[in-house]
Amino acid sequence: MSFSRGSEKWAGLFFFKTHVIEVPFEPNLFLIHLIAMNFLRKLSLIRAAEATVISFVIVSLLGGLALYLTESQRMINGKLPVLQEVQIIPRGEIAEGIRGEPEIQTHVFVKDVSYKGETFIDSWFTAVSALCVTGLTSTDFSQFTLGGQIITLALIQMGGLGIILFTSIFAIAIVRGISENASFKNILAGILDTEKKEAGKMLKYVIAYTLFFEGLGTVIMGIHLSNNLFQESLNGINPWWWSLFHAISAFNNAGFGLLNNNLMNFVNDTTINLVIASLIILGGLGYPVLIAIHAAIRSHIIGKNDLVQDHLHLQVEGVVASPVQTKVAIWVTLFLLFSGTFFTLALEWNNSIMEAYSIPQKIMIAFFQSTSTRTAGFNTIDIGALGAATLFLYMFLMYVGANPGGTGGGIKIPTVAVIYGYIKDWFAKPGEPVRLFKQKISKFALSHAIRLVGFSFIFIALITFLISAKEYQYLVTPDPTYNFLKVLFEIFSAFGTVGLSMGFVGGVTSFAAILSPFSKILLIITMLFGRVGPLTVLAALPWKRRYEKHPPSPDFQDAQRIQIG
């Protein structure tokens, strides 16, 4: 290419075979071209971890803006905490007719406020909660417009499938493929964290399972609710729209509901309880484990035909979970479901909110809450009425969460299993690798698990301290409206992307509704952190690049791969 100066233009000479084509060049356009190419080159260098973090933040802001616009004309019935002095006279003095000096105490009360249109903080909070498949709400979601509900549902689906699938693939992967001449499947493989040649295969399974389970759940609940007997329970909502919304919300472990009391209207409905619980469990198992279960079922049906078995193995090779990860996912999930159900029954059997139900109904309530608490956030009873021991148990279950590669949150079940194996290893022969189900576990899985637990504890402690400091004036008051347990429960729920909340008297939202805007932003950060994952955030830190080309140290021979985080 050569350039010659004209009056105000440059000319570029491009040679094709024997022909010479003269193309005029504008200096300003050429400068823009250089800037654009430089920008695309830098964009192409973004790693998958960085792309994940950036994608979640950008799409959450766009979702918040969309909800802000759709809800701008609606009257909002909000809540605000206020401090008020009250006179306290001991009951004994009243009974004995003694007139002593009343004690003056400061208590927190919640007052009603009305204003037009959602604030951007509340819109962003809802968008992040949907995108991170959490379910916490700072305003009454049952009052959202149809447009707002559709946007929220779209964010839930995007967040459940992995928002990076919808943004990085098109915004970064294509650019990197153009700039580095890389295969699109190879780039997609890095995004999906699977073997390069199997990326398209994983994507196919993810979409197929999502559509199948959500569709099946919608049909079962839609047929069940089409009966006129349920019109009062639905508060006039179309049963098919309710079924579709809750099927997507359940499979993606989001916890959003169209009624202001979530699923409390269906506390005795066996069909709704079992369908929602099943979708939660399936979504929380993780796609690699679902593929493994699917392959095992097909293999059993096919029998011992070697040719067909080899074909089946090629179909799932590279995308299926390792045998040890599959066993950990299934057995620990069952253990947590049983433990959560048993301890909920044992601790809350005589609770006033349970006394009206029969024994089978109590078991169903306990099972549903055990299922939902680990990652989904639906509730059929008032969580704020449960005892402190049960709430502590639920915080642990929310922290553990579900399995990697799925729609659930938390530090994930394999992380806890590997840490358990590490602790058990202290009693074993020195120098031996950690084992689960008698299989060697990769030392990289162990190091990732330790980092994940340590980093998550530090993060939760920091957020708890900051919110407690910001809400100090309300937390020092001696009443149950605004207390530290509610703050801590809300933080664990946000980190685990669960969505359960202890709420407050007179409220139909999460406890977050009466927190300050600063505390809401901290919860937004917590939801994003919990959904993206501490390990992804660590991998996205800029100084991590210094050693990205260093080869990893050798692993144990025959060590089983297990995904952490």
Image: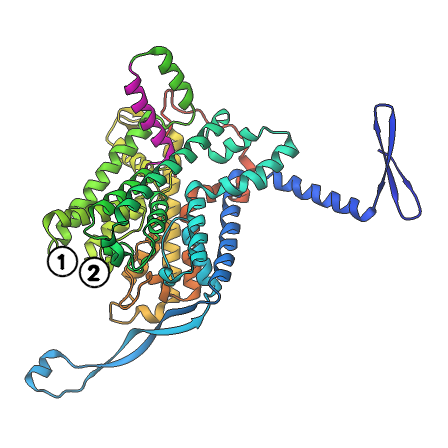
**Marker disc for residue 385:** 2
Q: Is residue 491 left or right of residue 52?
A: left
Amino acid on which disc 1 is placed:
Asn
Q: Is residue 182 left or right of residue 225?
A: right
Q: Is residue 411 left or right of residue 59?
A: left
Q: Residues within 10 Å of mark 1 (few under 14, many from 20)?
A: few
Check disc 1 and report its element: helix, strand or loop: loop
Q: Which residue is mark 1?
A: 351
Check disc 2 and report its element: helix, strand or loop: helix
Residue furthest top as drawn: 306
Instruction: Decide which of 409, 312 is in the foreground and name it.
Output: 312
Is the residue under label 2 in contact with that under label 1 (CB below 8 Å)? Answer: yes
Q: Is residue 451 visible?
A: yes
Q: Is residue 264 magenta?
A: no
Asked where in the image residue 514 lies, by quadrant, the reply is bottom left
- Provide the residue span drawn in magenta: 285-303
